[in-house]
Amino acid sequence: MTTVIDDILRENTAYYRRTKTMLVGRLLVNERGSLIRKQINGKTYNYLRKVHNGKRRDLYLGPESSLHMQRVQKSIEQSKSNLIELRRAKDALKKLRAKNMDHEDFTGRIKELFQLMDHEGLWDEGLQLVGSWCFKVYQNYLGVEHYPIRTVDVDFAIKIPYRGTPVKIGEKLREMGFQEDRNRKDGSIAYLAGDISIEFLKHRMGDGKSEGDTYIRELDIAPQPVPYLKILLDHPRTYRFRDLGKITVPSMPAFLAHKLAVSSKRRDPAKKEKDLRQALAVARAVLQDPELVEEFHTVVSGLHKSQQKMISKLAQSSDKFVPGSSRTFGEILC
């Protein structure tokens, strides 16, 4: 028989668990780093300081009055506030003797997912983390400047035909509690659990009419065919990060070329702007490393002439969607 006190404890535990999950999700998409102000010749210059592999890096944000500076400052302040609230929620859960805390927040779920891919050897067999989570990896670990991401969807690209050892990754995701969500239009399957949506993608040949059945028996998944994905799949980079473990993402030059190629075909202005803003942030990081610039030129030169022209044309007109971007794109394309 349950008592009134049992009900109160159960309600309080559920409340603090929901609060903890919400705060962790916010911390994942907010900026990390510290705001630094430098006085040079009597003027104030603002920088975002990040540390990666023991190396300190300061990214210029602009003057105090700039919109970009204000957004980053607000994001950092929000992160500090959320971190304090998160500690309070964790303390409350400890007092309530909540069990399995490490596996009930968003971070734990994502770590578990990446560890599964590592354990099954898929990072070494052509699997890549792409999309918004890939961009967050660039921001948090590879020095790309802040640009807010409002999605927590996880997208994986897989090289087809698959040449690795068969592994029923779809079955394993179901065992983790993910539910299948089949797209009737193209036959692809997504996996849903709470706020997390997982999609697998593969390169689409031509207009996609000859794709046929998308189900991959060796992996027990049905990836969605998307154009230009080969740009990413041909340029993998594998890292091992303390927070996430081993992970494979596209190289930043390949990501940049892919974003420009995809954006050139967008009809939705909002999606085009999102692509271009991410491309601009990555382009600024790539421009700081001559080797990355050279790789970008190699990636673009490997594209079809018509795709190269589309990218060049888009770069020249990008100011209509992201003011000031054409100068940066022009600099990296020259």
Image: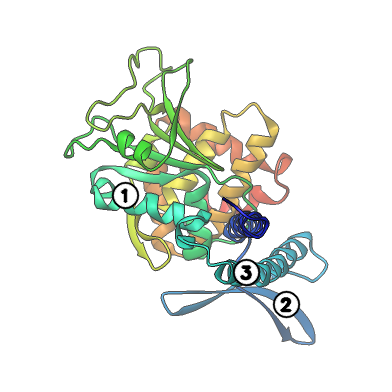
Judging by the rendered image, the residue that carries numbered circle 3 is 92
User: Residue 305: x and y, percent?
Assistant: 43, 30
Q: Residue at x 46, y 62 (%)?
A: 102
Q: Secondary structure at mark 3?
A: helix
Q: Residue at x 18, y 39 (%)?
A: 164
How many numbered markers are drawn? 3
Amino acid on which disc 2 is placed: Tyr
Judging by the rendered image, the residue that carries numbered circle 2 is 45
Callout 1: few (<14), some (14-19), or many (20+) C-alpha neighbours within 10 Å?
some
Q: Secondary structure at mark 1?
A: helix
Residue 116 vertical position relative to residue 92 in the rendered view, above or below = above
> On residue 116, which mark appears?
1
Indicate left or right for 219 with 179 as reference.
left
Q: Is residue 230 visible?
A: yes
Amino acid on which disc 3 is placed: Ala
Q: Earlier in the sequence, mark 2 or mark 3?
A: 2
Q: Earlier in the sequence, mark 2 or mark 1?
A: 2
Choose top left, top right, bottom left or bottom right for residue 318: top right
User: Residue 39: x and y, percent?
Assistant: 73, 86
Indicate left or right for 136 with 66 as reference.
left
